[in-house]
Image (tube, helix red, strand yellow):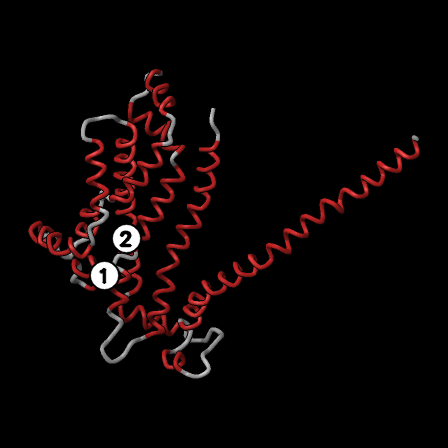
C-alpha cells in the first residue's frame, strides 16, 4: 500500500508540469496570430518615421529616384546647415519650447484647480457652469478665429507670444479631465485634513495632488503637444520671422515651384524629439502615480 501511494505521488508530481504546460502551449498557439498582427501593425506605424529619418539624410533629388533609398545617406549636416540658414531653426525651436512650456505650466494649473473645484465643492449653478464648459468643446476653432483676432488687435497683442498663450489658458478638455479624475477622490481624506487644521491650499497640495499625478501627467502631455503642434492661430498672430514657432517656420519652406523635402523631413524629425523626451520623462510619473494612488490607507 505504501509503495503504491509513493508511486502514485511520483506519477502525480511527474505529471503536473505536463498538465500545466499543455494549457500554456495552447495559449501561445492561440495568441500567435494576435502577436503577429500586433507586430505587423507596429512595423506599419514605424515605417513613416523610418522614412523621415532616411529622407532627412538625403538630397531632395534622391527622394524621387527609382528605387527609393532604403538606407541613410550622407547629407545630414548639409541639410541641417541649409535648414538653419533658411528658417533659423535654432531660434524657432527655442521659440516653440518657450511658448509650449509657459502655456503648459499655466494651463495645467488652471485646469487642475478648476477641475478640483467643480468636483469637490457644492455651490449653486455648478451643473450649469460645467455644461457651459462642455459646450465650448463643441465650437470649432475656425469660428473663434475672427473674434479672437479682433480682441488681440484691440489689445495690441499682434505678433506677440501672449496672444498665443492667454486666450487658451482655460482649456475645456483639461478642466473636464481633471474634474472626472477628482470625482473618484475620497472626500473623507479631505474632511480629515480639514479637521486636523490644514488650510484648503495645504489640503489641496499635500493630500489631493499626490493622488492625481496620473491625470496631471496625462494633461501635461496633451497640453504640451496641442500647443507644440498649433499652426493656424500662430500663423495668424505672428508676423516676424524671428518669432515664428516650428509649424509656422516649416510651412515657409513650401514654395510655389520648389519644396525642400529633405529640409522638411529633417525639421519634422527634430521637432518630434521634444515630444518623445516629454513622454519618456512623464512615463515614469504615470507609473509612480498609479502605484501611489492604488495604495489606500
Relative depth, front residue between 174 and 81: 174
Write down the residue under mark 1: 244
Write down the residue under mark 2: 227
33 left or right of 119? right
Q: What element carries label 2?
A: helix
Q: Where is residue 11 in the image (x, y as percent from the top left)?
A: 84, 41
Q: Is mark 1 on a helix, strand or loop?
A: loop
151 left or right of 15? left
Name, please, the residue furthest toward the left: 154
* Above or below, comparing residue 172 to residue 273 in the picture: above
Q: How many labels does the image show?
A: 2
* Above or below, comparing residue 83 to residue 152 in the picture: below
Residue found at x 42% / y 45%: 282
State the quadrant of the N terminus: top right
Dot 1 crowding, Cα within 10 Å, few <14, some 14–19, many 20+? many
* Above or below, comparing residue 22 to residue 287 in the picture: below
Q: Where is residue 68 in the image (x, y as percent from the top left)?
A: 45, 79
Dot 2 crowding, Cα within 10 Å, few <14, some 14–19, many 20+? many
Which comes before the other along the chain, label 2 or label 1? Answer: 2
Name, please, the residue furthest toward the bottom: 66
Amino acid at each position: 500500500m505504501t509503495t503504491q501511494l509513493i508511486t502514485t505521488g511520483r506519477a502525480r508530481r511527474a505529471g503536473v508540469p505536463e498538465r500545466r504546460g499543455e494549457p500554456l502551449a495552447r495559449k501561445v498557439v492561440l495568441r500567435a496570430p494576435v502577436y503577429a498582427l500586433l507586430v505587423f501593425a507596429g512595423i506599419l506605424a514605424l515605417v513613416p518615421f523610418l522614412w523621415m529619418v532616411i529622407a532627412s539624410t538625403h538630397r531632395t533629388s534622391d527622394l524621387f529616384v527609382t528605387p527609393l533609398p532604403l538606407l541613410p545617406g550622407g547629407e545630414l549636416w548639409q541639410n541641417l546647415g541649409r535648414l538653419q540658414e533658411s528658417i533659423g531653426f535654432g531660434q524657432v525651436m527655442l521659440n516653440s519650447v518657450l511658448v509650449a512650456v509657459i502655456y503648459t505650466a499655466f494651463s495645467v494649473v488652471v485646469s487642475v484647480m478648476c477641475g478640483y473645484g467643480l468636483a469637490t465643492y457644492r455651490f449653486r449653478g455648478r451643473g450649469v457652469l460645467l455644461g457651459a464648459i462642455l459646450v465650448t468643446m463643441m465650437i470649432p476653432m475656425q469660428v473663434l478665429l475672427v473674434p479672437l483676432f479682433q480682441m488681440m488687435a484691440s489689445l495690441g497683442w499682434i505678433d506677440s507670444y501672449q496672444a498665443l498663450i492667454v486666450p487658451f489658458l482655460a482649456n475645456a478638455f483639461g478642466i473636464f479631465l481633471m474634474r472626472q479624475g477628482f470625482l473618484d477622490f475620497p472626500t473623507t481624506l479631505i474632511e480629515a485634513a480639514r479637521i486636523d487644521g490644514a488650510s484648503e491650499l495645504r489640503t489641496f497640495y499635500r493630500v489631493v495632488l499626490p493622488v492625481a499625478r496620473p491625470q496631471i501627467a496625462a494633461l501635461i502631455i496633451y497640453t504640451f503637444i496641442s500647443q507644440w503642434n498649433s499652426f493656424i492661430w500662430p500663423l495668424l498672430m505672428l508676423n516676424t520671422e524671428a518669432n515664428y514657432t516650428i509649424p509656422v517656420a516649416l510651412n515657409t519652406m513650401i514654395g510655389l515651384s520648389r519644396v525642400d523635402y529633405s529640409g522638411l523631413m529633417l525639421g519634422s524629425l527634430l521637432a518630434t524629439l521634444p515630444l518623445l523626451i516629454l513622454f519618456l520623462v512623464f512615463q515614469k510619473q504615470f507609473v509612480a502615480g498609479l502605484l501611489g494612488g492604488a495604495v489606500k490607507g
